[in-house]
């Protein structure tokens, strides 16, 4: 994501499709970016229109199933173990139109902007951070301490 040369990304689309790869040109202010994936030593690039995304997940490792999918949300772990030290991050619950709910920490949510970053509350989650498209949400809760 911005400022990083190459991140492992999993793009979840509003229509339910999923694409995996790397990107060197994703930026929240741009309408499109390229998702590059390698198959058998050959790189294939896909142009992604940001407005079609539900969320863009930056994952820690490949091959591990997303831990947040299909599990009952546990809320926030005791002690906010994964909360960034910067206290401007607030507890956030993002609920998507497809019924998925993710608990995390955000600091840049603004309903006038197309999206925001969310750091998962669960330190065991395979997602390092998530760029959530505001248009894919049915509800958002910002929980101030």
Image (spheres, grey):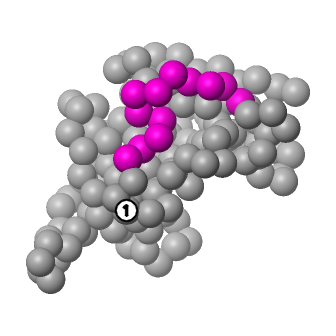
Residue 47 is situated, as x and y percent measured from the top left of the image, at 20, 59
Name the side, left or right, on which 40 lies relative to 85. left
Classed neighbour count for the residue bearing mark 1: other residues with Cα under 10 Å, few (<14), some (14–19), many (≥20): few
Q: Quick one: 26 or 10, which is closer to the camera?
A: 10
Query: What residue is drawn where x is 12% and y is 78%?
Result: 40
Name the side, left or right, on which 101 lies relative to 106. left
Quadrant for the C terminus, please: top right
Residue 24 in view, yes or no: yes
Query: What residue is drawn where x is 44% and y is 68%?
Result: 7
Instruction: Find out whether residue 89 is within the magenta segment.
Output: no
Residue 58 is situated, as x and y percent measured from the top left of the image, at 46, 56
Above or below — where is 62 with respect to 80?
A: below
**Callout 1: helix, strand or loop?**
loop
Judging by the rendered image, the residue that carries numbered circle 1 is 62
Query: What residue is drawn where x is 62% and y is 25%?
Result: 74
Q: Quick one: 6 or 83, which is closer to the camera?
A: 83
Q: Tell me which secondary structure the magenta stretch mostly adopts.
A: loop
Instruction: Find out whether residue 72 is within the magenta segment.
Output: yes
The magenta stretch is 65-76
Residue 10 is situated, as x and y percent measured from the top left of the image, at 35, 52
Residue 110 is situated, as x and y percent measured from the top left of the image, at 61, 34
């Amino acid at each position: 994501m911005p400022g990083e040369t190459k991140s492992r990304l999993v793009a979840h689309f509003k229509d339910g499709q999923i694409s995996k790869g790397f990107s060197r040109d994703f930026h929240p202010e741009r309408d499109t970016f390229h998702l590059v994936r390698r198959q058998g030593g050959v790189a294939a690039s896909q142009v992604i229109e940001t407005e079609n995304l539900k969320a863009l997940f930056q994952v820690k490792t490949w091959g591990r199933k997303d831990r947040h999918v299909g599990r009952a949300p546990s809320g926030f772990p005791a002690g906010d173990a994964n909360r960034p030290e910067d206290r401007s991050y607030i507890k956030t619950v993002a609920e998507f139109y497809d019924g998925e709910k993710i608990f995390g920490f955000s600091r840049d949510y603004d309903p006038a902007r197309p999206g925001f970053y969310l750091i998962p509350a669960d330190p065991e989650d395979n997602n390092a951070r998530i760029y959530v498209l505001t248009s894919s949400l049915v509800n958002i809760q910002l929980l101030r301490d």
